[in-house]
Amino acid sequence: MSFKRKPSARPAPAATLRELRPGEEGILDRLDVPEDVARRLMELGFLPGHTIGVGKAAPGGDPRVFRVDGSEIALRLETAGRLLLRAPGPAEETDCP
């Protein structure tokens, strides 16, 4: 007898801040940017392990507003694409209704 799991209807989790949609959140894993840019972003609250939420975007979609530590900070999509998120762990992948 074989048991096959139905494919999940949920999309794959975002890998970078750029891939998050408005209203979604992710946990920052690492910053893949030059040291001076990383330092400035960390001063603004973009620290590994912190939860980052997505706010509104400019009419063309760039820049986009991200919420971190109670602040809203606009980042260009180029930069947001270099801020990598943690892959969800087993506790974060629950399929509970």
Image (cartoon, helix red, strand yellow):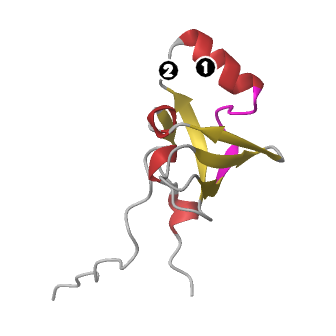
Q: Camera-side residue: 74 or 43? A: 74
9 up-or-down from 80: above or below: below
Q: Which residues are magenta?
A: 44-53
Instruction: Tell me: 35 left or right of 9.
Output: right
Q: Residue at x 66, y 47 (%)?
A: 66
The answer to whether the residue labelled 2 contacts the one labelled 1, judged by CB atoms less than 8 Å apart, is yes
Residue 86 visible at all: no
Q: Which mark is residue 38?
A: 1
- SS under mark 2: loop
List x then y, in percent, for residue 49: 66, 39
Instruction: Tell me: 9 left or right of 26.
Output: left
Say few, some or many: other residues with alpha carbon within 10 Å of mark 1 (under 14 / 14 to 19 / 20 or more): some
Say few, some or many: other residues with alpha carbon within 10 Å of mark 2 (under 14 / 14 to 19 / 20 or more): some
Q: Main secondary structure of the magenta part?
A: loop
Q: Camera-side residue: 19 or 97? A: 19
Tell me the residue that label 2 is attached to: 33
84 up-or-down from 59: above or below: above
Instruction: Tell me: 3 left or right of 75.
Output: left
Kindly report the distance in space between the C-alpha atoms of the residues bearing marks 2 and 1.
6 Å
Q: Residue at x 46, y 44 (%)?
A: 16
Residue 66 among those drawn in magenta: no
Q: Which quadrant of the structure image shows residue 3?
A: bottom left
| Total count of labels | 2
- SS under mark 1: helix
Q: Residue at x 57, y 87 (%)?
A: 97
List x then y, in percent, for residue 60: 47, 52
Q: Residue at x 50, y 66 (%)?
A: 93
Instruction: Tell me: 1 left or right of 51.
Output: left
Q: Quadrant of the N terminus?
A: bottom left
Residue 48 among those drawn in magenta: yes
